[in-house]
Amino acid sequence: MLKFSTDRVLVVGLGLIGGSLARALRARGLVTEVVGFDLNRSECELGVSLGVIDRIGEDLLEEVRRADLVVLAVPVKVMEQVLEQIRPALRDNTLLTDVGSTKSNLVATARHLFTELPAGFVPGHPIAGAEKSGVGASDEALFVRRKVILTPLPESDPQATLAIARLWQAVGAEVLQMEVQRHDEVLAATSHLPHLLAFSLVDTLAHEAENTDIFRYAAGGFRDFTRIAASDPTMWHDICFANRDQLLVQIDRFTQGVGKLREAIASGESEQLLGIFTRAKAAREHFSRLLARSAYAPDVRNQTLTFYTRPAGALTGSISVPGDRSISHRAVMIAALAEGVTDIEGFLEGEDSLATLQAFRDLGVVIEGPHQGRVRVFGVGLKGLRPPVGPLYMGGSGTTMRLLCGVLAAQAFSTSLEADQLLSEESMMAVLEPLRQLGAEVESETGAKPPLRIAGNAFIEAPDTPLQTDSAQVKSALLLAGLYSSTPTVITQALMTRDHTERMLSHFGCKLQCNENVIELSPMQRPQATRLSVPGDISLAFYYVVAAAITPGSDLTLEHVGCNPTRTALIELLQLMGADIRWINRHDDCAEPVADLRVCYAPLKGIDIPGEYAHAALDECAPLLVAACFAAGETRLMAPSDQILAGNARLQLMIDALVHLGGDCEIENNQLSVRPGPLTGGEVSSGGDARVAMALSVAGQRTQGPLKITACAGVGLYCPDFVEQARRVGMELFKEED
């Protein structure tokens, strides 16, 4: 087995990248010696004087023989010549890598030169740079939080790849791996093509007769886009030929795209033009979130956001809570399948609902917004969705995934649904089985967990016997799939679940019959565009309601809150505990009941939670436990027959946190008991659960001292305005990001 070392490093080419790597290695003490070799002697001398390298390499072949690691940091065309020159001096255990932005040409040269590729040869490409060049511009921090792509070959020894990866990581880089061809495809699209377009635009405008005025009055957008046209012409000349085939593919794709843009402008196709712009804007924002690692509800358990609270006075005034999450999802989905343009107000701009927006954009739907809760959806009808170019990414939104399964089951094209790590651990069997009864063809390589593959051209037809489910999301998926059935879709549910989908389908003109626990959707329905106003999310309102209910002197009004009877169980429970909560100005808005919710402080009392409220109490256990801690007397909840309380992660997080603060909460014999008692201040963790963090923030209004709540980053995804709105009504809540 070969042993590889990075103790003695030879950098061939002391430009910005080679010089920065050499400087970083020396500054961090990662190697014993860094030798620099460059045909420009003055660059080498400057490198020594600046402390970039330890010494100058006089004889290239001799230095290669002595080196443990050789880094080729010369232009891509020169790299092929250098590789041929140093070939005789490479030892079996010499590590060899490069920093070039193309890989196929170098690998092809290496295969031509070597009978057998060296085991230590691992091509690489740091995606970093700056406007200045040369060793004088070298920066030891150039690679910090930058990506380095390694393209190990079949002949590359895994230990060699590991050694080079660790060296890049040690200078602050994030190391990724790709196949050679994929690297060149990606770089052609994301780096090489933009540079060529900048060169071409500046060259074209420079030939204009009045180019002086063009450049004199150029605004920031022109300067930002064309900045890269000041790059080294010789280097980019070489890159064009080194990555010729991939660049030609990308230029052709771009030319087609510009052609579509020109056609839309020339023909006055407003919707087509808007579609190009909105898809591009959404894709750019999605790209930015990916770079920031925030795309669609990531795992935030280890992110650092801390809340600080202290006991507060009365909560007063009026606020509007963000739009309902469940309704926001369904509004976009049904509007996309409708015929015509639907305007939506009050859309929740949270990560989960943004995942739904992005999915339908990827399916060819033009969507304008969101902007301050306003979204305009240009519906394509039931048959108007288009195949996405790749898998649809759900992030952590289980609602998006389950409901989309129903929509996609009846399409003429196949689709793949992918999710983040947490959602990929959830079983989708509850929705897959009844969809298969409708004729859907859905597969998963991991049992019933994402990623899912939905086959196209499935024949959707409701069975003779009713479909059964006790899940609102599954019911919604079946109703959406049922839009494509030629026979009535009948669903029965043992428990009443959220009926937002039924109400919204009716608002879009579809015919349904809902009798107690039986829903029947008439066949061949075609949703028609309409106007939608999403009411405030009652699940978010609960936190402010509990805060006012436990704080003496409070008089708080929450405006335009959804009061759908399938969602008001916690309000009814609090009223049973003695809370002074009143619905004011009840009315229907776009098929959903809404009202203002006024909460005045009144002493709470502990209760035995009735069995019919047990499921709802567990769904909203975080704020309910806080209310119970400040009620006179014991509050008890006996688990429903299908629940094991000890396995409820959110419930256990709340109990652990409250007990840590001095609360008296316990689970025994599958019964939850909460007894009143003072809560101290101090420090407690939310465990990364947004709703636990929000509930503990509410508890902090009545603790005996200041409270520090860690791991609160998820609140920004679940309810972005929570802290600001809480402070607006008088809560003493602050946040600190590290």
Image: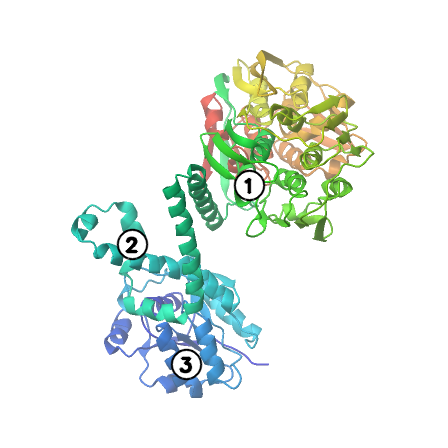
Q: Position of residue 124 (x, y in %)?
A: 46, 69
From this viewpoint, is residue 6 visible?
A: no
| Front in this rendered view, residue 171 or 640 | 640
Mark closest to the chain's N terminus, 1 or 3: 3
Taking the image as shown, residue 8 lies to the left or right of residue 557, namely: left
Please say if 118 is above or below 341. Answer: below
Mark closest to the chain's N terminus, 3 or 2: 3
The amino acid at mark 2 is: Thr
Q: Position of residue 592 (x, y in %)?
A: 61, 21
Mark 2, Cα crowd under 10 Å, few <14 / some 14-19 / many 20+, is many
Q: In the image, what residue occupies the spot 42% across and 64% down?
A: 248
For label 2, the SS is: helix
Name the residue beneath numbered marker 3.
83
Taking the image as shown, residue 514 lies to the left or right of residue 706, namely: right
Q: CA distance from mark 2 to mark 1?
A: 33 Å
The amino acid at mark 3 is: Leu
Q: CA distance from mark 1 to mark 3?
A: 49 Å
Quarter location, residue 619: top right
Name the residue beneath numbered marker 1.
360
Q: Position of residue 355 (x, y in %)?
A: 55, 41
Mark 1, Cα crowd under 10 Å, few <14 / some 14-19 / many 20+, is many
View extreme (right): residue: 465
Q: How is the image coloured?
A: rainbow
Of badges 1 and 3, nearer the viewer stands 1
Name the residue beneath numbered marker 2.
226
View extreme (front): residue: 267
